[in-house]
C-alpha cells in the first residue's frame, strides 16, 4: 500500500478515535453518579429490566440526578442482576442480585445518604481503603480475560465505547500490513479454532488465501447449539465489535470481500445487537465500502440459523445458508477450498475471531505466553450445574479442572460432594473425581476421553445419576442427527432405547456389552463430528461409572435416586409431625393423605416423584425419604374415609 | 351446526385469508433465489407464529421449487412449526443444566396442569407447551420461558402460580369488559 493511502487511513482513524475519546470524556467528566446495569440475556432473565425501572423511579422520586448506563454481561451469572454504582467520592462498587427493592434502597441510602450498604456489595472495582476489591476474590483474580476483557464494562450498542477502549486499532494496523504478515502473526500466536476441534487458525487462513476462487467468503459460526454453553451469545451481546473487528481482519488477510454472520435465531438479542453494531461500524467507515479510506471493501450480513445442532458443523452450515437441509458433506474438499457456492470459505467460531484483535494488538509472543505449548491462549467455559458461582469463566489453557471448579467457581453447594464433570456438551464426556487434576487444554481433555468442544461444562454432585445423564445426551443427539448416515440415524435410536430400558429398570444381561459395541459402530460409521462423538457420553460414563450401570441392570436400583421408575418417596412416621400439613399443599397431584393418627402418607399409585414434598417438609422434621428400589418404601394404607 | 360455531369458522377463515394476503404482499421483498428459502420461512413464522400449508405452497411457487422441497427444509429445522401456537406459549428448557436440575419435572407439571402434551395447545388456544434445547440461561436452571419472559429457578409450585396468574388476569379482563358493556348501555 502506498504511503499516501496510509496517510489517509491514519487521518481517518485518528478522527474516529478522537470522537470516541470525546464521548468517553463526556461520561467520565459528568459529576453525576453513574449506575451501570448488566443487560444481556441472563441479566434480563434475572430481572434487570425491573431493576432498571426501580432505579429510574427511585431517582425521580428523590429528585437525584444520576446516569443509568446499560452494559453487557461480565459472566458472573450467579450474581445477576449485577449493578455497578459509581458514586463520586467512592470507588465504583459492584452489587450482586440487585432486586428492585435493593435498587430503591441503594438510591436512598447510598446516593442520598452516602451509606454504600455493605451487606449487599460484592466488592469495589478499584483500589481503595474502604471496601475490599473484587480483584482479590478467586472468581476474579484467577481469570485471564482476553476475549471477554471488556464484556460487561461497555455498552454493546455504542461503538464509541469500544473504540475508546482501544477497539478497531488492530484493524487499522492490519490495513497497513500485507496479508501474509497478518497470517504469519496469527500462525505464530498458536491460536487454534475455538469451535471445538482446535484446527490451527493461521493455517486455515493461509489455505484460504492460497485457494483459487473469485468470491471468497468469511463466515462467523455463532450457531451455538450445545445445550449448556452460551459464551458465544454472551460475547455477541456484550462486545460485538471485537468479533466484527476479527472478521474484518480475517477477510483482509484471506482476500475475502464478503462476510456472513451465522447466528442462531434462538438468540434474538444477539441478532439485534450484532445488526446494530454492523450499522454503526459502517457509518464510521470501519466496515462496508472503502474501509478507512483504503480500497478494501467488506460486505457483511447476518444470517439467522434455524435451530439445528448439526449446523455447527461447517459443511452443514454452508448447506443451510444455501437454502438446503443442513446435512454435512464429505470432506475433502474442505470449505477453505470449496465452500459457500463453491468458493473458498473461512469459517471460524466467535471466540476465535474475538481472539484476533488482542493478538495483533499485544503481539503474537504475548499470546504465546498465555496457556500451554500446544494450546496457547485462553479457554472460555460456561460452568453450570451443581456449582456455587456458575457463569462464564475465561482462564489460561492448562489450568487444572480442580482449580476451575473448586477455587474459581466456589465448588459444590449445599455440602454435597463432587461426582463428575461433563466437559464438551453432547460430544464430550463425563470425568470423575480422579481426573480433577487434568489440565484444561485441547489435547489433555481428549486424552481423558472428553473434549474441549464448545466449552460447556456441567458440574454434577452425588445426587446425579450417570446413566440418566448419558440417556439425556443420547436423547439430544438422536433428535439432532440429520439422518444422512445409517449408523448415526438408527444406531443412536437403538442406543437411546437401550438406555431408556436400563433407566426404567428393564435392563437385561448383556446390555452393557451391547452398548459398547453399538457405540463403537456409530463412531466408525458416521461422517461428521456429531455421529463420531455422539457415543462419547455413554462410553465415558460406562468406563468410569460402570457400577452404576450394573446397579441399574442387575439390582434394578438407581444409586443416586434419580431414575424415577426405580425410586419412591415415603414419609417416615417416626419423624412426621402430627397436624403439620406442609407437604399436602405442595403435592401437585394430591398423593399425600392424612393417616388415622394425623400423620401423613404417600399414595404410591398417584405419586409422580417430583420431590416437592421434600422441599416443603420443615427442616426440623425432615420426614420425607427417598429410596431405590421402590419396593423398599413401607406401605401406608390410605384410611377408607375420614369424615372432616 | 350451531350459530356460534358458524361465526367462529368464518372468523378463522377470515383470519387465514388475511394471513395469506399479508404473506403474498411480502414475498416480492425477497429475490427469487433458493438462498432466500429459509429467510422467507423465518419471515412467515415470525409474523404469524407458524407455517400454514397454503403459505408453504406460496413459497414453493414463488421460488419455483416443489413444495415437498420446501417441506423438506422446513421440517429439518427446529425453529419451524406447522400448527398455530397458543396465545401464551410456554417453552420448557431441557438443556443439560436444566435436565440435571429437574427440568423434566417442570415440563410434566405444565403438561398435567394444562392437560396437554408438549407440542400441543389447549383446546381454547390459550396455552401451548414446547420443549427447547437450551435458552442459554443455564445459571438459572431450571428455566422456562413464558411468552417472552424467562422464568429462572422454576419449581412445580411456581408452575401453578404462573397459570393461575394468567387465569386471574383473564377473569379481570372479562369483568372489566362486562363493566364497560354495562356502562355503555
Image (cartoon, helix red, strand yellow):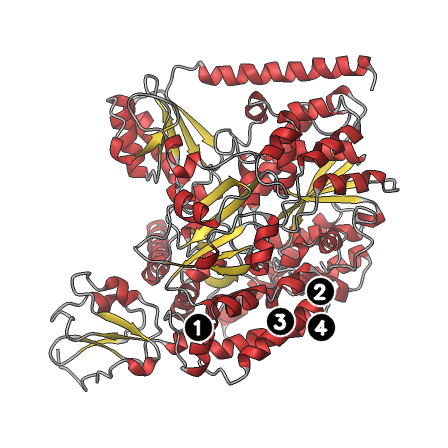
Nearer the viewer's eye, disc 4 or disc 3? 3
Q: Secondary structure at mark 1?
A: helix
Report the residue at 54% width, 14% height from top.
A22
Callouts 1 and 2 in the same chain: no
Q: Secondary structure at mark 3?
A: helix
Callouts 1 and 4 in the same chain: yes
Question: Looking at the image, which is closer to me, A254 or B176?
Answer: A254
Separation of disc 4 and disc 3 at Cα? 13 Å
Report the residue at 62% width, 43% height from top.
A375
Q: Which residue is mark 3?
A: A519
Q: Quadrant of the C terminus of chain A?
A: bottom left
Callouts 2 and 3 in the same chain: no
Pinpoint residue A345: horizontal percent, then vertical percent.
78, 44
Pinpoint residue A189: horizontal percent, then vertical percent.
67, 34
Residue A486 numbered tag? 4
Q: Which residue is mark 1?
A: A548
Nearer the viewer's eye, disc 2 or disc 3? 3
- Dot 2 falls on which chain? B
Amino acid at each position: 500500500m502506498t504511503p499516501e493511502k496510509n496517510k489517509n487511513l491514519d487521518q481517518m482513524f485518528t478522527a474516529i478515535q478522537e470522537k470516541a475519546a470525546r464521548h468517553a470524556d463526556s461520561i467520565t467528566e459528568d459529576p453525576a453518579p453513574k449506575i451501570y446495569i448488566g443487560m444481556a440475556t441472563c441479566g434480563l432473565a434475572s430481572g434487570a429490566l425491573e431493576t432498571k425501572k426501580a432505579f429510574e423511579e427511585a431517582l425521580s422520586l428523590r429528585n437525584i440526578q444520576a446516569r443509568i448506563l446499560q452494559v453487557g454481561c461480565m459472566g458472573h451469572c450467579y450474581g445477576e442482576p449485577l449493578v455497578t454504582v459509581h458514586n463520586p467520592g467512592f470507588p465504583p462498587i459492584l452489587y450482586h442480585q440487585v432486586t428492585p427493592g435493593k435498587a430503591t434502597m441503594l438510591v436512598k441510602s447510598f446516593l442520598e445518604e452516602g451509606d454504600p450498604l455493605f451487606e449487599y456489595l460484592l466488592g469495589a472495582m478499584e483500589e481503595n481503603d474502604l471496601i475490599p476489591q473484587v480483584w482479590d476474590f478467586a472468581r476474579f483474580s484467577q481469570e485471564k480475560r482476553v476475549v471477554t476483557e471488556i464484556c460487561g464494562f461497555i455498552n454493546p450498542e455504542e461503538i464509541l465505547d469500544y473504540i475508546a477502549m482501544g477497539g478497531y486499532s488492530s484493524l487499522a494496523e492490519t490495513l497497513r500490513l500485507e496479508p501474509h504478515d497478518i497470517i504469519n502473526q496469527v500462525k505464530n500466536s498458536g491460536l487454534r479454532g475455538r469451535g471445538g476441534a482446535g484446527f490451527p487458525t493461521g493455517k486455515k487462513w493461509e489455505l484460504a488465501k492460497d485457494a483459487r476462487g473469485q468470491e471468497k467468503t468469511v463466515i462467523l459460526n455463532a450457531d451455538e447449539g450445545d445445550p449448556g454453553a452460551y459464551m458465544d451469545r454472551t460475547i455477541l451481546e456484550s462486545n460485538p465489535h471485537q468479533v466484527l473487528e476479527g472478521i474484518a481482519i480475517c477477510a483482509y488477510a484471506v482476500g475475502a470481500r464478503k462476510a456472513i454472520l451465522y447466528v442462531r435465531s434462538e438468540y434474538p438479542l444477539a441478532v439485534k445487537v450484532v445488526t446494530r453494531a454492523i450499522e454503526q461500524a459502517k457509518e464510521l467507515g470501519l466496515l462496508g465500502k472503502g474501509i478507512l479510506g483504503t480500497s478494501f471493501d467488506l460486505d457483511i450480513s447476518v444470517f439467522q440459523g434455524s435451530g439445528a445442532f448439526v449446523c455447527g458443523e461447517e459443511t452443514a452450515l454452508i448447506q443451510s445458508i444455501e437454502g438446503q437441509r443442513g446435512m454435512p458433506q464429505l470432506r475433502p474438499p474442505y470449505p477453505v477450498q470449496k465452500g459457500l457456492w463453491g468458493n473458498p470459505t473461512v469459517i471460524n467460531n466467535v471466540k476465535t475471531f474475538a481472539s484476533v484483535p488482542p493478538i495483533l494488538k499485544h503481539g503474537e509472543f504475548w499470546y504465546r505466553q498465555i496457556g500451554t505449548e500446544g494450546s496457547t491462549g485462553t479457554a472460555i467455559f460456561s460452568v453450570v450445574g451443581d456449582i456455587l458461582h456458575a457463569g462464564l469463566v475465561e482462564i489460561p489453557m492448562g489450568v487444572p479442572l480442580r482449580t476451575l471448579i473448586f477455587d474459581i467457581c466456589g465448588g459444590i453447594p449445599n455440602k454435597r460432594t463432587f461426582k463428575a464433570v461433563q466437559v464438551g456438551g453432547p460430544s464430550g464426556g463425563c470425568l470423575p473425581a480422579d481426573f480433577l487434576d487434568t489440565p484444561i487444554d485441547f489435547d489433555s481433555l481428549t486424552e481423558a476421553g472428553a473434549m474441549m468442544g464448545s466449552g460447556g461444562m456441567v458440574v454434577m454432585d452425588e445426587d446425579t445419576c450417570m446413566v440418566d445423564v448419558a440417556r439425556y445426551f443420547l436423547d439430544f443427539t438422536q433428535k439432532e442427527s440429520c439422518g444422512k448416515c445409517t449408523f448415526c440415524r438408527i444406531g443412536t435410536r437403538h442406543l437411546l432405547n437401550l438406555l431408556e430400558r436400563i433407566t426404567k429398570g428393564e435392563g437385561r444381561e448383556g446390555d452393557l456389552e451391547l452398548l459398547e459395541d453399538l457405540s463403537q459402530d456409530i463412531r466408525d460409521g458416521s461422517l461428521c463430528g456429531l455421529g463420531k462423538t455422539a457415543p462419547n457420553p455413554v462410553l465415558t460414563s460406562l468406563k468410569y461409572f460402570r457400577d452404576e450401570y450394573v446397579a441399574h441392570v442387575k439390582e434394578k436400583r438407581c444409586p443416586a435416586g434419580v431414575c424415577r421408575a426405580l425410586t419412591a418417596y415415603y414419609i417416615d412416621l417416626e419423624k412426621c409431625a402430627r397436624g403439620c400439613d406442609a407437604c399436602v399443599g405442595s403435592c401437585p397431584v394430591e398423593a399425600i393423605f392424612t393417616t388415622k393418627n394425623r400423620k401423613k402418607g404417600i399414595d404410591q399409585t398417584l405419586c409422580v416423584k417430583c420431590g416437592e414434598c421434600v422441599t416443603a417438609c420443615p427442616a426440623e422434621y425432615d420426614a420425607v425419604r427417598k429410596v431405590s428400589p421402590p419396593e423398599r418404601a413401607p406401605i401406608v394404607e390410605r384410611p377408607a374415609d375420614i369424615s372432616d | 351446526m350451531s350459530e356460534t360455531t358458524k361465526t367462529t369458522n368464518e372468523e378463522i377463515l377470515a383470519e387465514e385469508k388475511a394471513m395469506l394476503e399479508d404473506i403474498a404482499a411480502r414475498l416480492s421483498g425477497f429475490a427469487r433465489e433458493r438462498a432466500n428459502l429459509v429467510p422467507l420461512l423465518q419471515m412467515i413464522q415470525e409474523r404469524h407464529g407458524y407455517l400454514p400449508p397454503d403459505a408453504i405452497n406460496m413459497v414453493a411457487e414463488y421460488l419455483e421449487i416443489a413444495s415437498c422441497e420446501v417441506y423438506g427444509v422446513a421440517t429439518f429445522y427446529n425453529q419451524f412449526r406447522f400448527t398455530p401456537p397458543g396465545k401464551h406459549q410456554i417453552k420448557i428448557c431441557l438443556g443439560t443444566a436444566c435436565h440435571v436440575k429437574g427440568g423434566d419435572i417442570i415440563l410434566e407439571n405444565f403438561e398435567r396442569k394444562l392437560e396437554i402434551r408438549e407440542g400441543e395447545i389447549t383446546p381454547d388456544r390459550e396455552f401451548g407447551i414446547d420443549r427447547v434445547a437450551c435458552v442459554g440461561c443455564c445459571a438459572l436452571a431450571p428455566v422456562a420461558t413464558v411468552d417472552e419472559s424467562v422464568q429462572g429457578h422454576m419449581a412445580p409450585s411456581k408452575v401453578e402460580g404462573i397459570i393461575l396468574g394468567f387465569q386471574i388476569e383473564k377473569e379481570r379482563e372479562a369483568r372489566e369488559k362486562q363493566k364497560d358493556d354495562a356502562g355503555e348501555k
